[in-house]
Amino acid sequence: METTSFLKALEWRYATKRMNGNGIPEEKLNSILEAIKLAPSSLGFTPYSILVIKDKATREKLLPHCYKQPQIVEGSAVVVFAAWTNFNEGQVDKYMADIAAKRNVTVDSLSGFASNVKGKINNSSIENLLIWAEKQVYIALGFGLTAAAIEGVDSTPMEGFVPAGVDEVLGLKEKGLTSVCLLALGYRDEEKDFLSKAPKVRRANEELFIHI
C-alpha cells in the first residue's frame, strides 16, 4: 500500500459509535486477526490470548457489562484482548520449542534466551507482569485498528467495560485470563452515528511533535 493510501485509511477510521449489523467477510476478518498476531511484543513473548466473539447470543450477554454500548451487538464481531494471569516456565518452554521448530535450531541453543525470559517471570510480581502484559496487548490492539482501516472495516476500541463481568461471561478466570480491552468490528451506520461525517480532530503537529 502506498503511503498516501495508508494515511487515507487512518484518516477514514474513527471510533465508530453505531454499526449497521452487516457481517464482515471472513477473509477481511482473518486479515485483521493476522495483523494482530504479527504485532511486536516484548521478548517476542505474547502474554495474552485473544477471543473472537461472533456469536450474537454471547455478545448480548456481554452488553450489560459494556455499559450497553450498541457496537457490541450491532457489529459483526467483538475481539477480546485478555492478559495472562498465571505465568509459568512451561509457557516459556513452549515458546522456545516454537522458535526452535520455526528457525530450525535446537532448543539447547536457546538456553540463554530462555533464562532471560524465565528471569523476567520469576523476578517480577504478578502485578508487574500484568502491567507488562497489558502494554503488549495495546500494541496488538493498535495493529488491529490499523488493519481494520486498511480493510475498510469500521472499529471501536473499548476500555469502557466491567472486566469482572466480561471475564465471568467468557469464563476467563478459569482459563487464567483477564480482559484488558475490546475491539468491536463491523460497518458504520451513517444515519445513526453522529460522528460518521465529523472531521477528525487531533492536536496540531507543532503542538504534538517535539523535534530535537
Image (cartoon, rainbow, N blue to C red):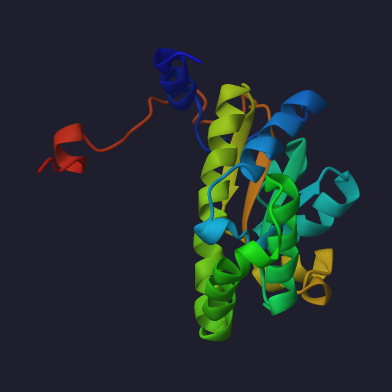
Please report the residue visible at 50 percent of the width from the left and 79 percent of the height from the top. Answer: 128
User: Is 66 above or below relative to 127?
Assistant: above
User: Is 171 above or below relative to 42?
Assistant: below
Question: Residue 189 appears in which quarter of the rendering?
Answer: top right
In front here: 208 or 105? 105
- Does residue 86 appear in the picture of this structure? no
Left or right of 118? Residue 31 is right
Question: Residue 129 appears in which quarter of the rendering?
Answer: bottom right
Q: Position of residue 144 (x, y in %)?
A: 60, 39
User: Is 197 above or below relative to 74?
Assistant: above
In front here: 189 or 80? 80
- Does residue 137 appear in the picture of this structure? yes
Question: Residue 168 appears in which quarter of the rendering?
Answer: bottom right
In front here: 67 or 101? 101
Q: The C terminus lies in which quarter of the figure?
A: top left
Q: Position of residue 211 (x, y in %)?
A: 13, 40
Please report the residue visible at 72 percent of the width from the left and 46 percent of the height from the top. Answer: 102
Q: Position of residue 31 (x, y in %)?
A: 70, 30
Please report the residue visible at 56 percent of the width from the left and 27 percent of the height from the top. Answer: 149
User: Is 161 above or below relative to 121?
Assistant: above
